[in-house]
Image (tube, rainbow, N blue to C red):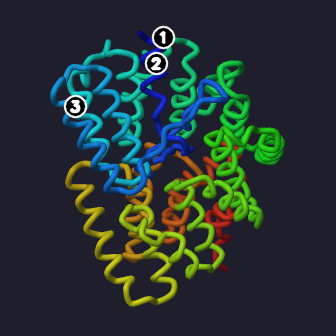
Amino acid sequence: MARNDSARASRVMAIFAARIAATWLTATAAIAAPYVPTDDAQVLERLPGGTAAQLRRLKSMQAARAAAPKDLARATELATANIRASRVEGDPRFLGYAQAALAPWWKDPAAPTAVLLLRATILQSSHQFEPALADLARVLEREPKHAQALLTRATVLTVMGRYREARADCSRLAGITPEIYRVVCIAAIDSVTGNEVAAYETVRRTLSNASRIDRAGVAWAETLLAEIAVRRNDPAAESYFRAALDGGRDIYALGAYSDWLLDQGRAQEVLKLVGSDARVDPLLLRLALAQSALNRPEAAASIDALRARFDASRERGDTSHQRENARFELALARNPRQALALALDNWKVQREPADLRILAEAAAATGDAAALGIVRKWLAESGLEYPAVAALVVPRAPAK
């Protein structure tokens, strides 16, 4: 059952990159590896139009699953639909529903391959990276050429800063996925380890030859190019962000593009870009930052809503939004010490450029020598080229 079941279960996994981060891919904090289609003619399933339609379909699927709780096909279908809803809606509650759908197998180390892959996706979405990696390892023991497991593991390892292991998985994608996935997977690592120029050009060349049908790979490539351009202070970042968002709603890209606009002093555009997506915590953060920059009276309500949401997350033990929480404390709550504590805790778990940036900003705001040293050491050892971050942690000459 392994290959057929895992292919069926992964068929409806999230389309857009994340990284994720992501994800985020994360929920936005989740790191979501893009789904790899098995052939050029394959039609990728899309979310039903509108939240109401989506919820009706989920309710119907939940009823079907309740009638046969140990039916693997129904359980994995419901879990994948909830994971998809979590990523599109930015609501982590859907991850809990996905976990509930897999309850009969949730603690089974020898669960079916489809369950292992979904369980790893749910675990990494809540930053439980090591258990997620364990499940992915089990999948790959059974199927060494399982493209989705390789790509997801490479994405998780990259976010954790374990670049050598991640590169090995990226390389194993050769011949089993469209070439754009292998190229972008490796370029994502090169771009943060001192080879960003080569990574940028390689992805640009590959993108120019990529099939537009393969929207998942194209969107991932466009988002990576945008992020490299941001760190290089290259205005081309905007065109890549717009291209990545042209194919559909992607919370991670929306957040990253909003950050770039805020850095450019274009807060007014963030208000329009985020719009109704402010129900998603990371996007509400960007909205509050934009409102605050513009001295809008509604900023106070947004700040209060964010504070309540972060407090609720801490109460339930959810640490997946620590990076956003640190930014909130630094820029909106004006509490740099708390921001630094959160940024340091976050850095223990994930080590993307955005995580380094908030750590550097909090360290600079507090003048914390140890934290500044962590940032300097990472820049030196990883080879990451990020002038804006490097400028924050330049040692100051002693006053005369």
Most extreme residue toward the left, as rendered? 67
Q: What residue do we see at 64% from left, 61% from top?
A: 389
**N-term mark: 2 or 3:** 3
Q: CA distance from mark 3 to mark 1?
A: 32 Å
SS class of the residue under badge 2?
A: helix
**Residue pointed to by mark 2:** 137
Q: What residue do we see at 48% from left, 43% from top?
A: 46
- Quarter occupied by residue 253: bottom right
- Residues at circles 1 and 2 in contact by the CB criterion of under 8 Å: yes
297 left or right of 199 in image? left
Q: What residue do we see at 46% from left, 72% from top?
A: 275
Name which residue type carries label 1: Glu
**Residue pointed to by mark 1:** 141
| Residue 311 higher or lower than 134, as above or below | below
Q: CA distance from mark 1 to mark 2?
A: 6 Å
Coordinates of residue 39 in the picture (x, y in percent): 64, 25
**Residue pointed to by mark 3:** 64
Q: Residue 382, which numbered label?
A: none
Q: Judge by depth and name the residue closer to the eye, 113 or 299.
A: 113
Front: mark 3 or 1: 3
Q: What residue do we see at 69% from left, 50% from top?
A: 222
- Residues at circles 2 and 3 in contact by the CB criterion of under 8 Å: no
| Residue 4 higher or lower than 17, as above or below | above
Q: CA distance from mark 2 to mark 3?
A: 31 Å
Coordinates of residue 173 in the picture (x, y in percent): 65, 23
Q: Judge by depth and name the residue closer to the eye, 112 or 31.
A: 112
Name which residue type carries label 3: Ala
Q: Residues within 10 Å of mark 2 (few under 14, many from 20)?
A: some
Name which residue type carries label 2: Ala
| Residue 36 higher or lower than 329, as above or below | above
Considering the image in quadrants, where does the C terminus appear? Answer: bottom right
